[in-house]
Image: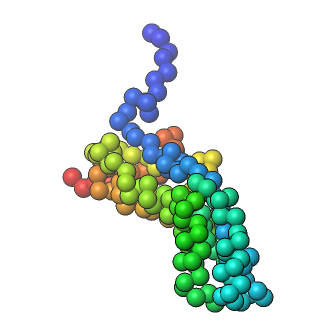
Amino acid sequence: MENTIVNKVSNSSLVIVDLQDYKSNGVRSLVDISQWLEDGLLREKSFRQLLKEHNWSQYKDHLVALDCSVEAILPAWATLLITTYLSPHAKTVILGSLNDLEKHLFSKTIDQLDLEKFKGKPLIIKGCSDYSIPEASYINLIQRLQKVAKSIFYGEACSSVPLWKAKK
């Protein structure tokens, strides 16, 4: 009798879902509005001039988060005006932090996931990755997967935590 090691995980119908596989490609950039303020105030004439003079082409194909690092009351049109300069160059522009940008990117990807490959299967949402994934993205993912999965676990195949099981 041979002592053969059998990999039960690879032989099972278990599907591992790694959000890192769904990370959007592209350079992330933070554009800080405070660079165009004077003592924390937006002065329209100089603000407009500074925006005209700014090198917007440096954001070619970037994923951009538009934020302000100082406490300032900004008129709504300010971010819209900056966006008109960014849009011809950047792939994406959002208002918020780099973390908000990641949430936005993952949300778009998760919302477009083809759920057919997960239908009726036990799933493990992989918990560890080399890349920092916003927790909100996991919440978005599980809400989508619950519609089709047989069961959902979190972690690794060797040590997973059961989260949900479909009712029979």
Residue furthest out toward the left? 168
Residue positioned 50% across, 64% down in the render: 104
**Which one is nearer the viewer's eye here, 133 or 67?**
67
Regarding residue 42, the answer to whether it shows in the image is no
Residue 66 in view (yes/no):
yes
Horizontal side, residue 107 vs residue 127: left or right: left
Q: Is residue 105 left or right of residue 36?
A: left
Name the one closer to the observer, 22 or 28.
28
Residue name at image x 48 percent, y 17 percent: 4
* Residue 159 percent coordinates (x, y): 52, 45
Colour scheme of the picture: rainbow
State which quadrant residue 132 falls in.
bottom right
Which of the pair 110/94 is nearer the observer?
Answer: 94
Where is 33 relative to 106, above or below?
A: below
3 lies above or below 150: above
In screen coordinates, is 78 left or right of 150?
A: right
Residue 9 vs 74, above or below: the answer is: above
Q: What x and y, as percent, mark residue 10?
A: 43, 30
Looking at the image, residue 141 lies above or below residue 14: below
Q: Position of residue 145 (x, y in %)?
A: 35, 54
| Marker count (numbered) | 0
- Give residue 34's position: percent from left, percent from top: 71, 79
Residue at the extreme right of the image, as rendered = 39
In the image, 33 versus 131, the foreground residue is 33
What residue appears at the point 53 percent right and 57 percent down from the top-left corner?
A: 91
Q: In which quadrant is the N terminus drawn?
A: top left
Residue appearing at x 70%, y 69% in the figure: 54
